[in-house]
Amino acid sequence: MPLKLLLLSLFLIFSCDNSTENSCTETVDCSGVCGGSSVEDACGVCGGNTNSADECSDASCDFEVCISIINVNYENNSLDIWMNNSIAVAGFQFDITGINNIIPSGGLSEENGLSVSAGISTVLGFSFGGSQIPSNSNGILIHITFTGITEDICLENVIFSGTGGNALESGTINCITLS
């Protein structure tokens, strides 16, 4: 029995990395992964998929939170909602007019543990467990797919909340006009 304890102790001692130094000898990517492959896209979003700076939201935001429509892809029926936020976001709700059958996914919402759903034209995001999108995250809030375009695509009735459900000052930056 003592031999088993000795062997177990030696195994535990030598199998643990007790060093406090960073042992990464490779490049650390933008998401902090040693040897990772994530890079910033044209909008400065780590792991983003925007290839042209023309698709980035370059408007200034004079509110606690601003959102805008970017990356509209008429062939794949998709778009992204970009968010600039100077304060942590605990929840949001907004309407998207001009498109049908909204399906939200991904983005900062999913990365930070918010549950996202959509109705006919309303997108809703919140956390049952108190998760938040940290302040100054500034990136794609949510990716949206849809089945059809009926008119100009606009964001309306925008509501954002912070910790404790406090309303945040929010601004909507744009609509997408059909050609």
Image (cartoon, rainbow, N blue to C red):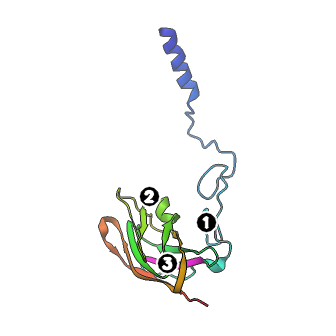
Q: Position of residue 128 (x, y in %)?
A: 34, 58
The type of residue carrying mark 1 is Gly
Looking at marks 1 and 3 on the same chain, the residue that comes earlier in the sequence is marked by 1
Residue found at x 48% / y 73% = 102
For the residue pair 86 and 158, the one nearer the viewer reads as 158
Q: Position of residue 87 (x, y in %)?
A: 41, 70
Q: Is residue 48 above or below residue 120?
A: above
For the record, the magenta segment spans 65-72
For the residue pair 135 and 123, the one nearer the viewer reads as 123
Residue found at x 64% / y 76% = 75
The type of residue carrying mark 2 is Gly
Q: Are marks 2 and 3 in contact (CB under 8 Å)?
A: no
Q: Residues within 10 Å of mark 2 (few under 14, many from 20)?
A: some
Viewed as shown, does residue 119 lie left or right of 53? left
Q: Nearer the viewer, mark 1 or mark 3?
A: 3
Q: Can I make out residue 132 in this image? A: yes
Q: Nearer the viewer, mark 2 or mark 3?
A: 3
Q: Is residue 25 above or below residue 145?
A: above
Looking at marks 1 and 2 on the same chain, the residue that comes earlier in the sequence is marked by 1
Residue at image mark 1: 48
Residue at image mark 3: 100
Q: Which mark is residue 144?
A: none
Q: Which mark is residue 113?
A: 2
Residue 103 within the segment the image draws in magenta:
no
Q: Position of residue 34 (x, y in %)?
A: 64, 49
Q: Can I make out residue 64 in this image? A: no
